[in-house]
Amino acid sequence: MNDYNCIASDVKLGQNVRLSKFVNLYGCEIGDETRIGAFVEIQKNASVGRCSKISSHTFICEGVVIEDNVFVGHGVMFINDSYPRATTESGTPQTEADWKVERTLVKAGASIGSGATILANVTIGENAIVGAGSVVTKDVPPHAIVAGNPAKILRFIASSGELKAPVAVPFLDLVAPHLELEHELVGAFRDSLHTAGFVGGAVVGEFEKAFAAACDTTHSIAVSSGTDALRFALMACGIQPGDVVVTVPHTFIATTEAISQAGATPEFVDIDEDTYNMSTEKLRQFLEEQCAREKSGQLISLRSGRPVTAVVPVHLYGQMADMDEILALAARYGLTVIEDACQAHGAEYFSKERNRWMKAGSMGRAAAFSFYPGKNLGACGEGGAVTTNDADVAAKVKMLRDHGQVKKYYHDVEGYNGRLDTIQCAILLAKLPHLAAWNTARRDWAAEYSRLLSGAEGIALPHEPAWSRAVYHLYVIRTSDREGLSEHLKIAHIGTGIHYPIPLHLQRAYAALNYQPGDFPVTERVAGEILSLPMFPQLTAQQQARVVEEVAAFLATVPQKRMEGEENALVSAERTA
Ligand SMILES: Cc1ncc(COP(=O)(O)O)c(C=O)c1O
């Protein structure tokens, strides 16, 4: 105590509290052994724990609770109202009754650097460090170091005090499944090495048989990639140079590359806002309103004047498009349906037409799969397959992948070097028995994500209609501040992806197709809002909990962001009672 201080009689001072000069305390509680610097003000209903240090010129307002062993630097400002106003709505000066005090909690062992501002309704976790000059707008996790305006997590400190990176969550873990199967995969390579069986051979046929069985088709033909699979499928189904193939603008460019490489031109219809797959209503409108039949019965696109001969629905993110509707429309207009099942190995669709669940790749005249390493069934390199129940289509794909030959050096047509090599087939054969369990794991993680995020405001979760059993190649959410959320997750060491940020009709590669912004509004809206969260079979509950926690932490900042936009929180006046 000294003559320069103003300490109200209602202040509860602990043992051995050391006060500097010009300290102003009223209605507050200070714990044993705590030191308070010069020009500090601590208001009523605020408390500071034991063994803490509050440096000079700091302002601790009503509603602030500081626990034990906390360091607060010089000139730290606490704020206790999210929406401070000088006057009421009717214009009269605010009184104490108008002021809504919000709580701020600084947990034990935390340190707050000089000149920091701590907004209302924030918890600073145990042992966390807030960098000097930061503006803390949301909760700081325990052991985190944050800095900046708004303060963001830089890294974490271990309880021993040394710096520790947060548990990172990769977007995709490709190492774990390969280590699990290391013995079998190395064995597959060794077999090829010992026999010099690198191209063709029994293993290729064995894999094709097994993959066809897994897809409920009579044939599967292994090829060099998903892109080639789709190109060969289109060509084998008789799509001719100059034809129009209808697909969606919300897909990977390989879909339309394959169409163009088959000599056809892609034309687009928009997607369904819930499933992100081809809108059957938009397909119907396209066929009815943007096409006309020639006398021959051939359907012609009014946009390009070319014959429309095929539809390629894409089973995006591992969920099948509404195939009954698409097949019915295609039948009505004499179109061939070729499924792009590159992201949908094992996905199922309940066909009302056939009254049973049907596998991706078994419903169109042919289908294309990709075995790119990150796919639900991935090779240790590039790969793909065509599936079909049509023996003629299968024979043509076999020819096309092998330089157009029916037997060695007898070429009926010019083909391609599009075979899948023996080692990849052996690797896929070793992995295929695990596909069902991996898909189940993906479905379980997706269900858990959806359960954990179900209450979160501001995001849309994936929608799985009753007729769908999706295999969640990707778990994609939507939010209006996609860039903010992905940046937040990146800082928290959580991997995300955007599939896909620029719709195909707006890609430079397709400028010649002459589509304009606004042509496919659902695709365009979705492309600006989607974010793919970490999804792979070996995800752990701990990793998923971190992702969900960080998504929730980001969403919790949204009201504060609104406030920052409406008024400058840094100049918001504090009530000094
Ligand atoms: C929807 C879709 N179509 C086609 C492909 C092409 O497959 P690949 O990369 O094996 O050529 C992919 C692969 O990413 C895809 O996601």
Image (tube, rainbow, N blue to C red):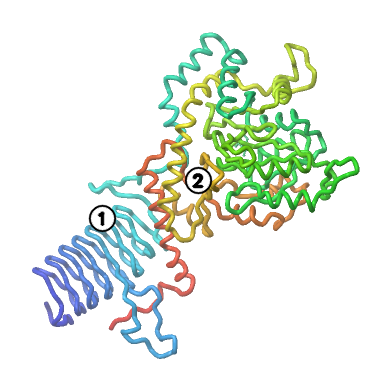
Residue shown at 53% from the left, 30% from the top: 378
Q: Is residue 141 left or right of residue 517?
A: left
- Residue most toward the bottom? 92
Q: Quarter of the image holding residue 25?
A: bottom left
Residue shown at 60% from the left, 54% from the top: 273
Q: Could you tell me how far apart the alpha carbons at marks 2 and 1 are, in whole angstroms?
A: 34 Å
Could one spot residue 201 in this view of the protein?
A: yes
The amino acid pointed to by label 1 is: Asn
- Which label belongs to residue 492? none
Instruction: Sort mark 2 into few (<14), some (14-19) or many (20+) by Cα contacts within 10 Å.
Output: many
The amino acid pointed to by label 2 is: Tyr
- Residue 316: x and y in percent read 59, 42
Decide: marks 2, 1 in contact (CB < 8 A)? no
Read off the residue under disc 2: 475
- Which label belongs to residue 127? 1
State whether residue 64 is above or below residue 231: below
Q: Quadrant of ligand 1?
A: top right
